[in-house]
Image (cartoon, rainbow, N blue to C red):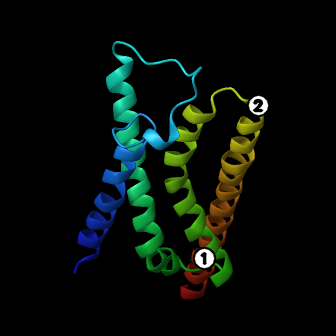
Amino acid sequence: MKTWAKVTIVTLLVAVPAFLLAPNGPLGVFWDPHPETPNPTGVQVPLYILLGLINAVVLGLGVSFLLFGYPLVSAVGGASRRLTRAAHIAIGWVLVSWWLHDNLHMVIGMELGGLLGIEYGFHVTLMIAGVTTAAFFLKALRGQELRAGAAC
């Protein structure tokens, strides 16, 4: 089976339940939004539905990337195996984290302990993922420069 077909299947197998199981989704009753979370009105309703759909699809793409993306990341070359794996996981985390992150905001509301957990659990780890991806990118560029210099 072609990789694009596998990615499409995995993405849909993850995205459809993720969309349905979100706190405002039809099957998301097990984690109701915080009572003080305001309900969207007017044009906000379809915009929040669209945001939920985007979150679910990106979650599915992230799972697909984690399952099938390592060969593409390692093909870039120029970085150690450890940094390459870290970059693969970091990119995957940037993709998969938004679904849970956004949904937890709705469930936690403005409760400061929960918000602090989101800050460290998502925001700080996304910062680490950005630094990891930048380090990988710089190593890969240096590797390309070295290979280009050796070819001259």
133 or 141: which is nearer to us?
133
Q: Position of residue 123 (x, y in %)?
A: 68, 45
- Residue 132's tag is none
Horizontal relation, residue 93 to residue 27: left or right? right
135 or 31: which is nearer to us?
31
Relative vertical location of residue 148 with respect to residue 66 in this rendering, above or below: below
- What distance separates the C-alpha of mark 2 from that of mark 1? 34 Å
Residue shown at 49%/47% (left/top)?
A: 99
Relative vertical location of residue 133 with respect to residue 117 in this rendering, above or below: below
Is residue 67 visible in the rendered image? The answer is yes
Q: Residue furthest front?
A: 30
Q: Position of residue 119 (x, y in %)?
A: 72, 42
Crowd tier of the residue under label 2, counting other residues whose Cα lies within 10 Å: few below 14, some 14–19, many 20 or above: few
**Mark sitting earlier along the chain (2/1):** 1
At mark 2, the secondary structure is helix
Position of the N terminus, as image quadrant, is bottom left
Horizontal relation, residue 67 to residue 98: left or right? left
Residue shown at 31%/52% (left/top)?
A: 16
Relative vertical location of residue 152 with respect to residue 123 in this rendering, above or below: below
| Front tag of 2 and 1 | 2
Q: Position of residue 15 (x, y in %)?
A: 35, 53
The residue wearing badge 2 is: 112
28 or 83: which is nearer to us?
28
The residue wearing badge 1 is: 85
Residue shown at 76%/31% (left/top)?
A: 112
Is residue 80 visible in the rendered image? The answer is no
Badge 2 amino acid: Leu
